[in-house]
Amino acid sequence: MEGEIANRLLLGVATRFENYSDFGSNLSGKISGRLKLTDGLALRGSASTGFRAPSLHQRYFQNTSTQFVSGLPSNTLTVNNDNDIARKVVGVDALRPETSINFTAGITAKLGSLALTVDAYEIKIKDRIVYSGAFSRALLGFTTEQYVGINNVNFFANAANTTTKGIDIVANGRYNIGKGKLFVTAALNFNKNQVTSVNSTTLINSAEKNDPTKSPDTWFKNLLFDRQQRSRIEVWQPMNKVNLSLTYSIGKLDITARTVRFGEVKYVHNLDTEAKKSDGTFWNTQFDRDASGKAYIDQTFAPVWITDLTLNYRFTKMLSASLGANNLFNVYPDQIYVDPRNAIGSVDYASGRDASNRGRLLFQPNQGGYNGRFVFLRVAVNL
């Protein structure tokens, strides 16, 4: 339902009721408003609640896959949440829906040929469904006859509560330059994802499953949502992005230049590189460290700028051709750290010292890809 007051204030209210045989009922709602201050300036905002039931694959998917962990093959069994391994051995709760609370506030403005929007937002997700860390067969207490060939077990669980805060800024302009027209777009995003708490159970937190005399990497409460899984929410993706685009059209020719800056990202190993024993030594001693004791394997990748350029010529309404280059300046991201002791031909090689798979994987998932420059000629025919 939406209505306008005095041609200045627009208010909206919406609600949604859902009922699931597996999860019961949910009532979500949203209120929104837009206040017109002048012909070219307005304020807007909204508040809403959200609900997402577990997907089918999160509830029922189960398979065995071979993955390479630190360069060595490992058979991983993904079990569904109802499996006895997840529910009884590890001790997680049955999957429940995610719920969220969302807030936005912003301003829109039009100054001549320039259109500008600025929006801030906050999203709080409760009971977020995530993929667990890897529970080894030894920790799960498998006998030699159980799950032959399986090294690790993973599953889906409502393991985290998260908060996302950010701001979006978008500006668009259109200008007459000479005999042509220039279209300008600038978009900026700044955001921060944070895991505010980890959901666990009495069984997972029990003393028998978290032996203080053993490495924290074996504790069930840490494995449920390990440091690498946490990092994938908080620092694995850029926390800021800048997108600038220019298109100049003159006659039948369009020239488009676009550059995107992806902010830094971080790779965090699943093993706790900073955990120490009671005597002050590290539990994980295989990693090279700097003078302060920080392991090199946890790595920050610097921001990158990726620039594209395209020239398009329209011969007729049906026929056009484009010549261009993606990643015009052949920019590559930082390479992943490779332990010097793992150099090619080294007799002292140990796969667990870095995450490069014997030096074969030089790039982790990163901001701009690692394929370098791509040049193309494209002909398009519209029928």
Image (tube, rainbow, N blue to C red):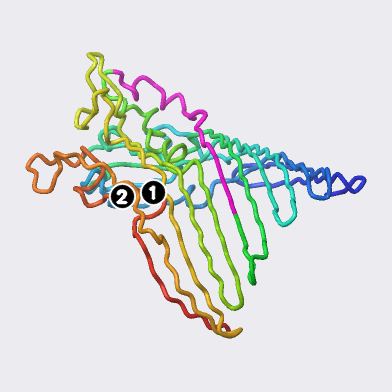
Q: Is residue 205 magenta?
A: yes
Crowd around label 2: few <14 · some 14–19 · many ≥20 (10 Å): some
Location of residue 378 (image quadrant):
bottom left
Q: Residue reaching furthest front?
A: 178
Crowd around label 1: few <14 · some 14–19 · many ≥20 (10 Å): many
The C terminus appears in which quarter of the rendering? bottom right
Q: Residue reaching furthest top?
A: 279
Left or right placement of residue 67 versus residue 206 in this view? left
| Three-letter residue code for mark 1 | Asn
Percent from the top left, x then y, of residue 299?
Answer: 33, 37
Relative height, residue 265 to residue 286 (above, below)? below
Give the secondary structure at mark 1: loop
Location of residue 284 (image quadrant):
top left
Left or right placement of residue 145 versus residue 64 in this view? left
Q: Which residues are magenta?
A: 186-212
Percent from the top left, x then y, of residue 348?
Answer: 9, 39
Front one among 60 and 233: 233
Determine the CA span between mark 2 and mark 1.
7 Å
Contact? badges 2 and 1 (CB < 8 Å): yes
- Give residue 268's mark: none
Residue at x 73% of width, y 41% of height: 46
User: Across the whole image, how many numbered discs are drawn on residues?
Assistant: 2
Residue at x 65% of width, y 37% of height: 101
- Give residue 366's mark: 1
Percent from the top left, x then y, of residue 48?
Answer: 70, 40
Residue at x 45% of width, y 24% of height: 202
Q: Is residue 140 magenta?
A: no
Give the secondary structure at mark 2: loop
Residue position for label 2: 363
| Three-letter residue code for mark 2 | Phe
Percent from the top left, x then y, of residue 141?
Answer: 28, 33
Front one among 147 and 357: 357
